[in-house]
Amino acid sequence: MIEITTVTKRYGPKVAVKELSLSVPAGELFAFLGPNGAGKTTTIKMLCGLLFPTTGTVAVGGFDLAADGDRARALISYVPDQPFLYDKLTGREFLQFTADLYGMPPAKARDKTAEVIDLFHLDDFVDDLTERYSHGMRQRTVFAAALVHEPKLLIADEPTVGLDPKSVRELKTLLRQLAANGTTVFLSTHTLDIAEELADRIGIIDHGRLLGCGTLADLRKHASVDGNLEDLFLAITEEGARGAGRGASEDQAAASGAAREG
Amino acid sequence: MSSLPLAPCPSPLGRTPSQPAAFRRLRVRLARNGLRVALEAGRVRFFSVILTTLIVSGFTFGFSRYLFGQLAANNIPFKGAIVGSLFDLLFFTLGGMLIFSTGIILYASLYTSPEARYLLTTPARADHVFATRFQGAVAFSSWAFVALGVPVFVAYGLSAGVPWWFYALLPVFLLGYVLLPGSVSALVCLLLVRFMPRNRKQFLVIVGLIVLSLLTVWGVRTARAANRSIVTQGRELDDLIEQFDLVRSGAAPSHWMTRGVLAAARGDAEEALPPLALVWSNGLLLYVVAAATAKRLYRPGYDHLAGLGRGKKVFRESVLDRLMGALVFYLDRPTRVLVVKDFRTFRRDPTQWALLVVFGSLMLFGAGNYRNYMSADLAVMDKYAISLMNLGGTAVLLCAGLSRFVFPLISLEGRKFWILGLTPVSRDTILCGKFAFAATGSVLIAEVLILVSDVLLGLPPEAVAVHAAAVAVVALGLSALNVGLGAVLPNFRETDPSKVVVGFGGTVNMVIGLGYLLAVIALMVVPYHTAQLARATRSVDAAVSPLVYAGIPIGLALGGAAVVLPLRAGARALRGVEF
């Protein structure tokens, strides 16, 4: 479902993502982990078609995001960490707008809207203007909108922030069900417990490089550490930071040498 | 790792209903819900916006009627070349302003708004997103153009005696004209963002310098030609008119507007409709070109802008901060630190003070030009009337500026109040600090503007003294009102100051502020000006009656009350607030 091929993304002189390659098949729940500023959000923005790679390609469902972006985005739902809702729309109107935007036939849109309202327990407030919603209510509404058009790929950035424990539990069950029914779930999170509990595979990124990718067992083997995901994460990112430091020193030395020779 | 599907997934795109219909429904719903909320929750604000618009439109109508009356008094034909030149200039200037205002709004709504970020992650086509944002930007930037343009041309119609259908065509002309500058600014915005060189700052500085140089050269030539025309009693008028050749050329949309409006005023439908068609067809064509450009360039432009990265800007203490600290030397150190903190926030946000700079420059430029008219013995307008307008304008600007910047200060402290709350500074001191900051800045700015413009206008010392006293009372009173009411009617839920300002508290504050400044000017200044005007019209040389100063002590007392009462109420409210 997701095919990222040797992608590099630069912001001016800064390299946010460096030669990233990653494949995620349909129906997999993939957790994407990394420290702050590691390149997670940039990767997600490229997956949604919000940004384009400086080099390399990103394809979703077989459609290249740069060349055939509208078709690719029709398969995707993105739930950002700070969800956007129109203040002057009700939750129901926002769901209807989303269904319209994704070209759903009216009858099907009505049925799916009713279904997600029920699924996310929006009944009590779905006809209020969203400007009156709490963060948790907003998050649930955005999730409902993300699922109303039955996406093939769900991308969620820190989806559990602001949700109460019961909602977190329900969300975890839902994400597993979605993956079981063939939807690919790409989850970016700092909550390692959730990644450990839910993910089929885990990718760890730091300094724009994918440091490790695989099942928990694969990562244990890769890091030569027999612990939980937190131990693995710390071991892999620390090793990655040392590698990045060495790389930077070598780059600097090469540059100084070149300057001296010049 | 599993392999990808060989064939692309079936994409749901292309099924009903269409995206344009979805966006149309969205706009209708947003407008309907917004109006309902405005009527249900914010009636005061809603009706004060309507009332303010009506007052501004009424004032524009009255002023235009007066100016058209002056044309009639000087036997200048209403449908002739001079009025045509004036209309050319008016449409050209307004078109230029619309290009800038629409461009700025469109840039923000296409490239920095959360809505754009959301829509770009959906399958919404780039040109559809552009279209919906374009309509919003043009409506937002042009409503003032239509609200001010209609009264000007209604006044013209009534003065010139035009057929009834002139009034029916008027909104069609104005709405059509809005499309042209809007589309031009959209095209410029899309191209600029997509092809902006990597060194953004250098590029913008170079473009800004070129535009500024061209405007300066043109401005200096025009001013020289205007002065020549004045000192030669109009003999060199051709020289002045030549400076506006571009505006009056047949290819200029502003000239199409003038031709159409004048033909409609003459009752010549055959001559009026082709320019109207030109305006609309070119506007629509440019809009289509802009939408097609957006289809190709909007998404790459968004990516390009993000890819430019941000330079690391180092913020340091400025000499201005030390100056601000020195100006409030009479306060204790903790309060001084708070004042400097508020000032630093203010000076680092150019949107806060840009309007002030523009208004101040225009006012002083106008007052400076008045001297040329006086030296040529052309008493176009009474200097007392101009100085009163300057005073009123400065007071309204203070009211708007303080409402925008000072009123939300307490509301914005709410979320981070623990910072101030943990310092050994009492809440009364915090309030006093905010008042000292607002009062120092507003008194300084208002006095400088009024004194310099009065001196340029050549007003007598007693008039300058009356103005200085009035503007000080207005500045002090408005500062206290904004600080006090900001504490009495805070909005701790909102993080965006512009939303705090347009809320219930902000509207109440604005209405009270406007009422206060009108009362002070009416009590302290208007009697003096009325007496001077009466003297001028009767050509009497006698001194004005001392009674004209009778309102000054009442104004001072009102000012005292406006300082003490809101601050006391604000302090009481702030002491009781739980953060």
Image (tube, rainbow, N blue to C red):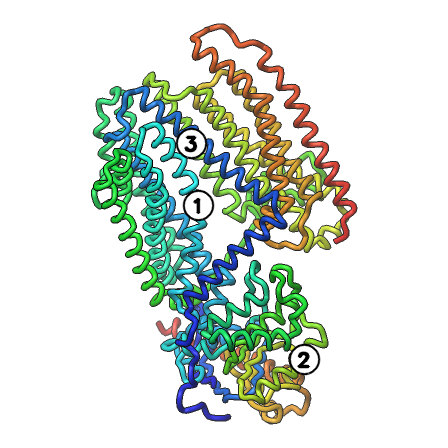
What is the distance, in whole Å, between disc 3 and disc 2 at their CAs? 63 Å
- Residue furthest right in the image: B576
Q: Quadrant of residue B173?
A: top left
Q: Is residue B97 above or below residue B461?
A: below
* Nearest the eye: B125 or A227: B125
Q: Position of residue A29 (x, y in %)?
A: 57, 86
Q: Chain of mark 1?
A: B
| Residue located at (42% from left, 52% from top) | B104
Q: Is residue A144 left or right of residue A74?
A: right
Neighbour class for label 3 at 10 Å: few (<14), some, many (≥20)?
many
Q: Give a yes or no on whether discs 3 and 1 share a subunit.
A: yes
Q: Is residue B543 above or below residue B365?
A: above
Say which of marks 3 and 2 sits in front: 3
Which label number is shown at residue B61? 3
Q: Position of residue A37 (x, y in %)?
A: 55, 72
Query: Mark 2 highlights which residue?
Result: A170
Q: Is residue B30 visible?
A: yes
Which label number is shown at residue B483? none
Neighbour class for label 1 at 10 Å: few (<14), some, many (≥20)?
few
Q: Which amino acid does the dot numbered 1 rest on?
A: Trp
Q: Is residue B214 left or right of residue A106?
A: left
Q: Which amino acid does the dot numbered 3 rest on?
A: Phe
What is the distance, in whole Å, between disc 3 and disc 1 at their CAs? 16 Å
Q: Give a yes or no on whether discs 3 and 2 share a subunit.
A: no
Query: Mark 1 highlights which residue?
Result: B143
Q: Is residue A251 left or right of residue B469?
A: left
Q: Are marks 2 and 1 in contact (CB under 8 Å)?
A: no
What is the distance, in whole Å, between disc 2 and disc 1 at their CAs? 48 Å
Q: Is residue A52 above or below residue B436?
A: below
| Residue located at (26% from left, 19% from top) | B233
Q: Which amino acid does the dot numbered 2 rest on?
A: Glu
